[in-house]
């Protein structure tokens, strides 16, 4: 193949996409703005720099979704996984790496390929022709951000995330919670029952506010100034503005009748809304937070109905440029309005080193197929790779889209298995067995 693939951003996703494409014989040009243009988080001019922790999280491919993603990436010849395995540090069941030699390894491997060129330059516009993958990450440069907005509209690119915790539906106690939209609004029965409600008595509310105010908060990273927008204040900040603020905001009890105790008026109600088409995940509405993870699980399990909640994702607020991928990208990660451009990595609304690299790998493979005139079968949604890409390109609720880690809530359920915490081990094993077989099948066909 003599075609050229341009990749903008030599981070986790861009490096992985470049490796896949170059190994398949494409001519690859990586356009990376560092070290000429810096970000507040990157320290070097190397490719695939890890900007914060040195962990790729769990390496357990049987019981953990990110461990499964590692497995799928290794099976697909991932450079990220090769570098991580080469520079692995002892970390129990987690995959931690020695960051400097890790990114040096990726840099050396890519620069050693005769068909890869690295150009140190900032790309500030979306090109009109050629074949491109944009993988510019959470700190996409300002000029390029402006170009993306000009193409997609102001509402479709965010510069901060405001992540509310997400709970596995089957871990919610439905003997306490009930389904109802405020004032039973909606045309259909489904819309009238779109929210899941958790009621609180006055004592429970007061104890919850005390716990919120006393919780440990995560600091912002250097360079991430605390820019709260009125629509997405952290709940603990709202609580600090007055003990009743939440009861008049996201926890207001009006327009709702407790289906289990119709005569009892709740003092406050926490609402959860469906977060994916599968209906396996619910996000706690308006509960974006900067509480530390340990505090979040403790505080949120005080909510009646969530005492045994399992969290698919905890809340957070970070500097994070990401697009509204469910509306902007097609199933092959192409920008619908400019299909010669793919997006990959964190800018597409996945979250984390591994997920970003995985989406780079996939974008690379999809570009290779397109440039060689092959059509690939869709990536099975039963695989970690497929579950993630299906989520960002359509499965997620576009209106409330926020970055997502890989988790089992994104997978289509396996029939006939016990739900809840008790069935979890067997369920996860069934998910990962199915994923491995389906991923190998897809790789064979690709
Ligand atoms: C402060 C901070 C802390 C984080 N901590 C963690 C953590 O602990 N664990 C974790 O898993 N994830 C963390 N993340 C998220 C992490 O950045 C991503 O998971 C991962 O690096 C994303 O990979 P990527 O390839 O999409 O983006 P990146 O790895 O950031 O790569 C994008 C590349 O594009 C380049 N670029 C940007 N704009 C342009 C342009 N216009 N032209 C050319 N090049 C450009 C950048 O210089 C960069 O090299 C953190 C993010 C931030 C901002």
Image: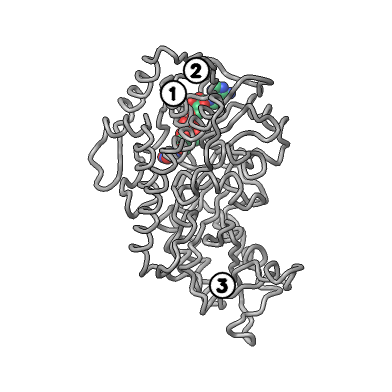
Tally the numbered discs: 3
Mark 1: few/some/many CA within 10 Å (<14, 14-19, 20+): some
Q: CA distance from mark 1 to mark 3?
A: 53 Å
- Going from the N terminus, do you reach mark 3 or mark 2 first? 2
Q: Position of residue 317 (x, y in %)?
A: 54, 46
Instruction: Of the two numbered discs 1 and 3 on the same chain, state the one appearing first in sequence.
Output: 1
Under circle 3, the secondary element is strand
Decide: marks 2, 1 in contact (CB < 8 A)?
yes
Residue in the foreground of this view, choosing between 1 and 335:
1
Task: List x then y, in percent, for residue 207.
Answer: 49, 71
Above or below, 114 against 289 in this view is above
**Residue hosting label 2:** 1
Q: Nearer the viewer, residue 283 or 246?
A: 283
Question: Residue at horizontal 62%, vertical 19%?
Answer: 130
294 sits to left or right of 401: left
Q: Look at mark 3 in the image and give the residue it sits on.
A: 198
Q: Earlier in the sequence, mark 2 or mark 1?
A: 2
Residue ID for mark 1: 24
Is residue 39 something that shows in the picture?
no
């Amino acid at each position: 193949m003599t075609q050229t693939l341009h990749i903008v951003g030599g981070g986790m996703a861009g490096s992985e996409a470049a490796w896949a494409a170059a190994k398949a014989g494409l001519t690859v040009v990586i356009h990376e703005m560092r070290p000429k243009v810096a970000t507040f988080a990157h320290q070097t001019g190397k490719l695939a720099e890890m900007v914060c922790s040195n962990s790729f999280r769990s390496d357990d491919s049987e019981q953990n979704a990110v461990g499964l993603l590692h497995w799928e990436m290794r099976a697909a010849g991932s450079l990220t996984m090769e570098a991580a395995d080469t520079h692995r540090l002892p970390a129990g069941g987690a995959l931690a790496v020695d960051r400097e030699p890790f990114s040096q390894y990726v840099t050396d491997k890519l620069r050693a390929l005769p068909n890869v060129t690295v150009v140190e330059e900032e790309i500030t516009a979306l090109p009109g022709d050629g074949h491109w993958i944009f993988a510019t990450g959470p700190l996409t440069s300002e000029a390029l951000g402006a170009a993306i907005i000009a193409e997609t509209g102001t509402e479709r690119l965010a510069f901060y995330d405001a992540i509310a915790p997400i709970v596995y539906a089957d871990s919610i106690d439905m003997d306490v919670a009930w389904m109802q939209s405020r004032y039973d609004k909606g045309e259909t029965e489904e819309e009238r029952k779109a929210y899941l409600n958790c009621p609180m008595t006055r004592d429970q509310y007061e104890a919850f506010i005390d716990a919120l105010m006393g919780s440990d908060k995560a600091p912002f990273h250097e360079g991430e100034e605390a820019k709260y927008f009125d629509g997405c204040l952290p709940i603990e900040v709202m609580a600090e503005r007055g003990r009743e603020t939440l009861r008049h905001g996201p926890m207001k009890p009006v327009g709702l009748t407790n289906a289990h105790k119709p005569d009892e008026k709740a003092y406050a109600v926490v609402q959860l809304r469906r977060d994916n088409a599968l209906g396996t995940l619910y996000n706690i509405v308006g509960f974006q937070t900067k509480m530390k993870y340990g505090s979040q699980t403790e505080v949120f399990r005080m909510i009646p109905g969530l005492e045994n909640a399992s969290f698919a994702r905890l809340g957070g607020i970070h500097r994070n440029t990401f697009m509204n991928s469910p509306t902007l990208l097609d199933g092959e990660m192409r920008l619908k309005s400019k299909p010669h451009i793919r997006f990959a990595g964190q800018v597409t609304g996945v979250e984390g080193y591994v997920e970003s690299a995985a989406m780079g790998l996939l974008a690379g493979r999809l570009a290779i197929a397109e440039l060689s005139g092959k059509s690939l079968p869709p990536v099975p949604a039963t695989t970690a790779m497929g579950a993630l890409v299906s989520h960002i390109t359509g499965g997620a609720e576009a209106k409330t889209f926020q970055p997502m880690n890989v988790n089992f809530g994104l997978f289509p359920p396996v029939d006939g298995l016990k739900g809840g915490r008790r069935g979890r081990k067997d369920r996860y094993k069934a998910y990962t067995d199915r994923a491995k077989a389906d991923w190998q099948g897809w790789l064979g066909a690709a």
